Image: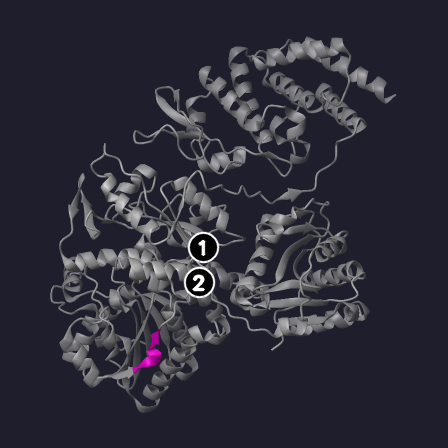
Amino acid sequence: MKRAYYSNSIKNFIKDDNSKILGELSLHHTHALEELQRNAWIAQIEILKDQLKEFPNGQVYFEFAIPRMGKRVDNIVIVNDVIFILEFKVGDNEYGNHAIEQVIDYTLDLKNFHEGSHHSKLIPVLISTNASKFENEQTYIDDLLTAARINKENLGEYLKHVAEQSNGENINWLEWETSIYKPTPTIIEAAQALYKGHNVQEISRSDAGAINLTKTADCLNNVVEFSKTNNKIAICFVTGVPGAGKTLAGLNIANERMKSDEDEHAVFLSGNGPLVEVLREALTRDEVATSKLNGKPLTKKQAAIKANSFIQNIHHFRDDNLISEKAPVEKVVVFDEAQRAWTKEKASSFMKIKKGKADFNMSEPEFLIDVMNRHKDWCVIICLIGGGQEINTGEAGLEEWVLALKEHYSEWDIHYSNLIIEDKNYLRDQSLIKWLNDNGESEKDLHLAVSVRSFRSEQLSNFVHKLLELDTVATKSLFEKIKNEYPIVVTRDLDIAKGWLRNQAKGSERIGLVGSSGARRLRPHSIDVKNEISPSDWFLNDENDIRSSYFLEVVATEFDIQGLEIDWVCLAWGANFHINSYNEWNYQKFSGTKWQSINQEVTKQYLINTYRVLLTRARQGMVLFIPEGSELDHTRLNEFYNGTYEYLKEIGIQELTKENFIEIKKEKYVVKTKTKTSTKQKNINSLDKELHYSIQEPKPNLFSTKVHNTPSSKNLSTEKIGKFVKRKMHELIENDLIDNNELIKLQNLDYCINTFHLRYPLLKKKLSTDPENILRYWKGSLNIRGNRYFICSEWYEQPDNNDRPYFEKWLNKIIIKHVNKKNPLDLTIAENQIEFARNYAMYKDSIDLPKEVNDQIDDFINDYNKGFTTNQETYNSILECIHQFIRSLKA
């Protein structure tokens, strides 16, 4: 199958007829071809032919497939040893953040998963055709921290410059385009791809380490087909190491067996509420987007109906079948994380208290088998089992499933992974092991042995296993093998941990903060594990949403993240699970105001499994945050943390401190084309226009000034934005100019985003537990009417990201309120005077006014800064004087 809709040598591409190229692109396009897409292709063809004419050698591709993402790159151009990934934004006059992330994502996908690109030089390029020229920083582009920003006029110039600077071996484009693509999608990406009709081979790696994912799918399909043909009832137990693709295998079989035309229905069931919520929401959003591309748009509600029938909560399935005694419509049922089904005691208690079923006396596994046993012809249950991943009281593990089969359903065909007999993490009861061995079929293809969650290191699950066993020698040896491909670091500074995550992430790679639900004394570090998150917002929303994982403000616990994964993780390690003075794990739970020891072995195992889950959630790398203890707080003693920290350093994990870590300040990407006002004459014209308008009539709304008319940082002041904001806020607070209504607003994030362009509230009320120095706020709180507040320090003043106009606009509003209270003149007088001050500040460095005029204006500005209005007659006189002077200059 061709990866690109069109490919050719640059030389032949330039000779090719445009209509022929367009026809070939249209032929391969699977959706309805809209005018917008057609026009975009026409523009790309014309621009590339014009800009590539000086390249005698090279290869060009249109619509090159990125299977893992289910998308296509606009263009790829190979010149010498460099692969340029091009994303066109035809007609755009700005370099948008989303577009830059998109092209970086394409580049990373090829770098990580396309064999021919692993060691090649890849350059992401965003072409906003109508944007102004941008000075690119090539070092950042080479490191994939950003993309080159190019317009339609300088694309060729940039490609030539980069190609000439590179001196590697020329790429054999034929070998490159036919090299193996080995994707490792997240479970969310995999669900979306399977839902669209892709098969598991297309979206999984093809190397020997992960080939059994396909074999597992084949084995399960064989069982289903045999049962269907021979009217058999069967159950399969699939095992695998954390991240091996058990959920992917389950989603795949459920999707493949959705054959309603053959009266064969399948469903994917999970008791993991967050997983169900996230996958449903992801499928729904994707379906809505895809339907628009296909020209048959669906509402979100319509798309959700379909997604919700494919993925269901196991407890809802249970409750539905409590009401009815009929066989369910589904013939193939996949139970994800089946080890988490409830024991007889927990299920009976729940049914009695919550459902009023006093006579319910079955474990959840027994009841679910009983429901499927209602089928008179055939059915198949597929249980996905994670060994050593039971994390909650009342979770049955595999033993309840085997016990139910032995005691009540021994006539079922049983197919089980060979690891169930061989590994103590799955079954501990020797009598059940013997019974299963005698009555079931062992299938080696039902075990997934290699983690595909971390495409960087297949040894991660082994490393975590040995780490939790406190096997220092083996753990150290395994870490040596994985550390170059899968970075792990440790720190005692949460700010450094967050900075490390931001440094590592590129494009839209997801970062997040996780912790144990029992780590209750992380609260002094603003990590509240009791604060519930919205899983779909945390996992799916972008970096501009404060609820998303990107903001590193809300922590996901083991219950939120089990079965899911993100790229880069910060694990905040709690005092509930630490190494004591005997070099053994100490198990604790927090009750009331103190820690209590955990003595029950099963509860200890739950806690070990909690950290096993948390340590295996990152696809690419993680930072371990071990807080400093405090001898002044009996719940956070040094002994609760130091042993764990020393153990992690002993096995070779690098320690990050303020001495050896620097956070890379990544730029904000959006760069808008601005009107140039650099010449003296343009400044004169602009000021004349503004002053003329001020004299003619009062401005109805001072605060509707457009962005391109706001001052840039170099025009405003030599005082840096941070110092300016801090000084002005101190003045406002000292003079009690912030009223209660405004005080409430300044603590509201949405208000501060819209008003100041900030990502955090401008004011943060100091809690009794807060130190005097907190992240993203200036050190030292200030008293405002009896309470203490921190002032946000995250202010920027760059050509493409200028926060000063937003703050000044708000400051003017506060001053206007104050002026009007002190001297109740008509409000428009104050508005006009402040508008004049702003305009004068913008242009005064570029216009030589007579000294007497400057002196008058300076007096006026001083009055304005003190909160006084000038007499309207005097004010108009000053304006007229300046107006006449400018007229004489223009003449």
* Disc number placed over residue 794 in the picture, else none: none
Dot 1: element? helix
Q: Which residue is label 1 attached to?
A: 540
Residue 411 makes an appearance in the image: no
Tag 1: amino acid: Leu
Q: The C terminus appears in which quarter of the rendering?
A: top right
Q: Using the image, tell me which numbered label, if any, was put on residue 188.
A: 2
- Residue occupying the point 61% across, 72% down: 30
Q: Earlier in the sequence, mark 1 or mark 2?
A: 2
Q: In the rendered view, tell whether residue 407 sits above or below residue 292.
A: below
- On the image, the x and y values in percent for residue 538 come to 41, 51
From this viewpoint, which residue is outermost toward the right? 891
Q: Which residues are magenta?
A: 443-448
Q: As displayed, is residue 882 above or below residue 350?
A: above
The reply to whether discs 1 and 2 touch (Cβ–Cβ < 8 Å) is yes
Q: Residue furthest bottom?
A: 230
Residue 219 is one of the magenta-drawn residues: no
Please tell me whether residue 794 is drawn above or below residue 326 in the rendered image: above
In which quadrant of the rendered image does the N terminus lie? bottom right
Asked which secondary structure carries label 2, the reply is: helix
Residue placed most toward the observer, 480 or 384: 480
Residue 827 at x, y = what percent?
Answer: 58, 18
List the single residue furthest toward the left. Answer: 359
Q: Quadrant of residue 393 in the image?
A: bottom left
- What separation in Å lies between label 1 and label 2 (alpha carbons)? 9 Å
Residue 194: tell me if it is visible.
yes
Residue at the spot x=60%, y=45% of the render? 669
x, y percentage for residue 768?
Answer: 30, 29
Q: Indicate how the structure is coloured in the image.
A: one colour
Q: Is residue 407 left or right of residue 487?
A: left
Closer-to-camera residue (366/614): 614
Instruction: Tell me the kind of residue under disc 2.
Output: Ile
